[in-house]
Image (cartoon, rainbow, N blue to C red):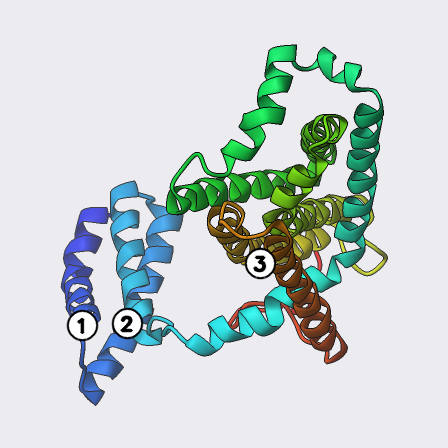
């Protein structure tokens, strides 16, 4: 193929296609012309790729064909209905489907955490293997309680929100290979058990639980959901089931994992607000704990009521406009 001659022959058509693609309004004749030129340009691109794959010309035509396609199909319009469906159907459904995984994860690591806490509370000398006496005194007398009022509420909120979102993202993503998520959760259980055991051993258990419960119930639940969903993704390629390939099973569960991760950003936003504004508030401990408990129960009701309802009705977690994986041929 003489590339220069080919460009000279069809360059006028490409320029015309580019001009039509940029227009906001087209007449009926121009719309028909746009369709015809788009089809021809797509053919030209295919021929050039197969016979004389000049990278610069291929890139130019690819951009032109994509622009023309967008002009023909139109960009998807933003819809609050899609947002509403995500929070009332898609997200709770994805979390509900994975409930055995994250409930199991929460149970195992809660038992581990409280076991460590009780052991250290009964044997306070064990804490000396991790912290010096000066550090233990600082934690008991000032550091633990002072941590929640160290920053302005809005700064504390943003700090813990981003930190917890990162931790949840790590446990969710690492679940695909199993061991990293177990390691991250064990570190979290060790730190919580150590601090709780020290505070209980020195008669400050009321302060520990009074400051942890307002935000910790929702925060830890979000982390456990991320870990459980991550482990579910990992298990999907180990045991895909009789009707799915490993690739399809991994793709389907990973897609649900992405949706869960997106929804958990909002959940952690709420837990961050609780930690930034409620935990350090000058309110009685019982009031702050009650607020945290009510928010946590409301989230669980939200997941199990709306999620189960969507599951029973046969709802899908597929994003609007996406071709469901089940409709695609298995490879």
Q: Nearer the viewer, residue 32 or 23?
A: 23
Q: Which residue has dot 2 on it?
A: 71
Contact between marks 3 and 1 (CB within 8 A): the answer is no
- Give the Cα separation between the discs numbered 3 and 1: 37 Å
Crowding at label 2, few (<14), some or many (≥20) Cα neighbours within 10 Å?
A: some
Seen in the picture, residue 124 relative to 114 is either above or below; the reply is: above
Of circles 3 and 2, which is in front? 3
Q: Which residue has dot 1 on it?
A: 20
Q: Residue at x 47, y 47 (%)?
A: 276
- Give the Cα separation between the discs numbered 3 and 2: 29 Å
Residue 234 is tagged as none
Crowding at label 3, few (<14), some or many (≥20) Cα neighbours within 10 Å?
A: many
Residue 259 is tagged as 3
In-image side of 181 versus 109 (left or right): left
Q: Earlier in the sequence, mark 3 or mark 1?
A: 1
* Quarter assignment of residue 56: top left
Q: Position of residue 99 (x, y in %)?
A: 76, 58
Q: Is residue 329 visible?
A: no
Of circles 2 and 1, which is in front? 2
Q: Position of residue 317 (x, y in %)?
A: 63, 67
Badge 1 marks a residue whose secondary structure is: helix
Q: Earlier in the sequence, mark 3 or mark 2?
A: 2
Badge 2 marks a residue whose secondary structure is: helix
In-image side of 100 versus 294 (left or right): right
Q: Position of residue 304 (x, y in %)?
A: 73, 68
Q: Quadrant of the C terminus?
A: bottom right
Q: Position of residue 267 (x, y in %)?
A: 56, 56
Contact between marks 2 and 1 (CB within 8 A): the answer is yes
Q: Nearer the viewer, residue 3 or 76?
A: 76
């Amino acid at each position: 193929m003489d590339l220069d001659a080919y460009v000279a022959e069809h360059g006028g058509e490409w320029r015309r296609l580019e001009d039509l693609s940029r227009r906001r309004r087209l007449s009926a004749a121009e719309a028909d012309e746009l369709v015809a030129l788009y089809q021809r340009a797509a053919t030209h691109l295919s021929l050039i790729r197969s016979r004389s794959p000049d990278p610069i010309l291929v890139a130019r035509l690819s951009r032109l064909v994509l622009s023309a396609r967008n002009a023909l199909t139109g960009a998807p319009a933003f819809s609050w209905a899609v947002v509403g469906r995500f929070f009332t159907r898609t997200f709770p459904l994805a979390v509900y489907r994975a409930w055995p995984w994250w409930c199991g994860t929460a149970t195992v690591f809660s038992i581990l955490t409280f076991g460590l806490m009780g052991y250290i509370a009964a044997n306070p000398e064990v804490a000396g293997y991790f912290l010096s006496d000066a550090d233990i005194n600082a934690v008991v007398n000032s550091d633990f309680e002072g941590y929640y009022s160290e920053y302005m509420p809005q700064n504390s909120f943003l700090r813990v929100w981003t930190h917890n979102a990162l931790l949840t993202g790590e446990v969710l993503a690492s679940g695909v290979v199993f061991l990293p998520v177990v390691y991250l959760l064990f570190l979290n259980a060790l730190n919580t058990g150590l601090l709780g055991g020290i505070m209980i051993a020195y008669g400050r258990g009321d302060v520990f639980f009074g400051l942890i419960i307002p935000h910790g119930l929702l925060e830890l639940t979000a982390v456990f959901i991320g870990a459980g969903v991550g482990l579910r993704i990992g298990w999907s390629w180990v045991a895909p089931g009789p009707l799915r390939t490993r690739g399809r099973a991994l793709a389907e569960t990973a897609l649900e994992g992405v949706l869960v991760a997106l929804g958990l950003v909002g959940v952690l936003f709420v837990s961050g607000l609780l930690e930034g504004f409620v935990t350090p508030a000058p309110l009685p401990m019982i009031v702050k704990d009650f607020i945290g408990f009510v928010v946590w129960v409301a989230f669980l009701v939200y997941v199990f009521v709306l999620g189960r309802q969507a599951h029973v009705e046969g709802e899908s977690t597929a994003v609007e406009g996406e071709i469901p994986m089940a409709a695609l041929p298995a490879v």
